Image (cartoon, helix red, strand yellow):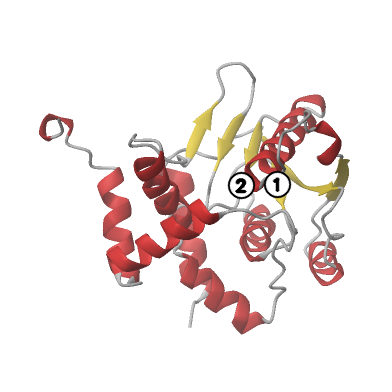
């Protein structure tokens, strides 16, 4: 059973170590209605009650032309938690150039662009995303196997071209911990059901991660720690 105090403690640790939230921040949370972003929104709602840091936040759902509407039960949770939820439409299909194929990567890029543009236009200086530990490890494996480089999504990323910083407060949370908690609470299990899904690379990296760690949470945490302890003198 995943205790919310344990989850929040891990998020607090990530925020402290990477200095993710500062006085005066205006944070835009990118949400999908799924378990990860819902947990992130719940954390921000609870954090506001502490009043230890002066910041504000809102949530943004980007509705593509072939995605479902935002889940009503999750929308009701946001209302219960006093979370401002904004929605914008993104016509992904019509942005494709001739002979280009729709893919998860293309859709993600278009939605990320809209998220960034909305943040800049509305005066937000940070974007919070719900990527957890497994996402980061899977991306590391995927980049290593497919691109031949050692890189991944990082907990805090500052754009050079834009006045925006991306933060990933769930970086210390294994996915199993999120699933256990959300199941316990009976929260929505909404996931993307788009007919254009082609995430075989992500699925393969997930399979390899499970194989390497035997789906053991402690082994995943050790693997994540290795990303913070790179000894470049022992690499070719």
User: Residue 23 location in percent, x, y?
Assistant: 61, 34
Q: Is residue 2 left or right of residue 22?
A: left
Seen at 72% across and 73% down, the residue is 188
Seen at 37% across and 49% down, the residue is 141
| Nearer to the camera, 61 or 80 | 61
Which of disc 2 and disc 1 is earlier in sequence? 1
Above or below — where is 39 with respect to 120?
below
Give the quadrant of residue 228.
top left
Q: Is residue 145 left or right of residue 204?
A: left
CB-based contact (under 8 Å), mark 1 and mark 2: yes
Q: Is residue 222 left or right of residue 42?
A: left
Residue lying farthest to the top in this orientation: 161
User: Residue 180 location in percent, x, y?
Assistant: 53, 78
The 10 Å Cα crowd at callout 1, few under 14, some 14 to 19, many 20 or more, is many
Above or below — where is 92 with respect to 46?
above
SS class, disc 1: strand
User: Residue 106 location in percent, x, y?
Assistant: 68, 39
SS class, disc 2: loop
Q: Is residue 54 visible?
A: no
Distance between the Cα atoms at labels 1 and 2?
A: 6 Å
Q: Please give the count of numbered marks on the rendered protein.
A: 2
User: Residue 11 location in percent, x, y?
Assistant: 49, 56
Specify the label residue 199 is tagged with: none
Q: Kindly identify which residue carries mark 1.
A: 30
| Nearer to the camera, 211 or 62 | 211
Give the quadrant of residue 79.
bottom right
Q: Kindly identify which residue carries mark 2.
A: 129
Seen at 30% across and 72% down, the residue is 214
Q: Is residue 160 visible?
A: yes
Seen at 67% across and 45% down, the residue is 103
Quarter of the rendering occupied by the C terminus: top left
């Amino acid at each position: 059973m995943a205790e919310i105090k344990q989850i929040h403690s891990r998020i607090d640790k990530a925020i402290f170590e990477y200095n993710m939230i500062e006085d005066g921040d205006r944070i835009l949370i990118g949400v999908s209605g799924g378990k990860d972003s819902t947990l992130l929104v719940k954390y921000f709602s609870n954090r506001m009650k502490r009043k230890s840091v002066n910041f504000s936040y809102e949530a943004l759902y980007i509705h593509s032309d072939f995605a479902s509407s935002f889940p009503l039960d999750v929308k009701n949770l946001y209302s219960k938690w006093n979370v401002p939820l904004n929605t914008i439409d993104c016509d992904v299909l019509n942005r494709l150039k001739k002979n280009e194929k729709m893919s998860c990567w293309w859709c993600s890029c278009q939605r990320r662009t809209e998220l960034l543009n909305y943040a800049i236009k509305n005066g937000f200086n940070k974007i919070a995303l719900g990527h957890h530990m497994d996402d980061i490890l899977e991306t590391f494996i995927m980049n290593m196997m497919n691109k031949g480089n050692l890189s991944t999504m990082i907990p805090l990323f500052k754009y050079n071209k834009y006045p925006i910083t991306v933060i990933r407060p769930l970086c210390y949370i294994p996915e199993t911990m999120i699933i256990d908690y959300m199941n316990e609470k009976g929260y929505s299990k909404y996931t993307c059901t788009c007919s254009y899904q082609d995430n075989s690379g992500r699925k393969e990296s997930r399979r390899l991660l499970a194989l390497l760690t035997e789906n053991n949470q402690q082994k995943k945490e050790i693997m994540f720690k290795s990303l913070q302890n790179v000894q470049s003198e022992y690499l070719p």
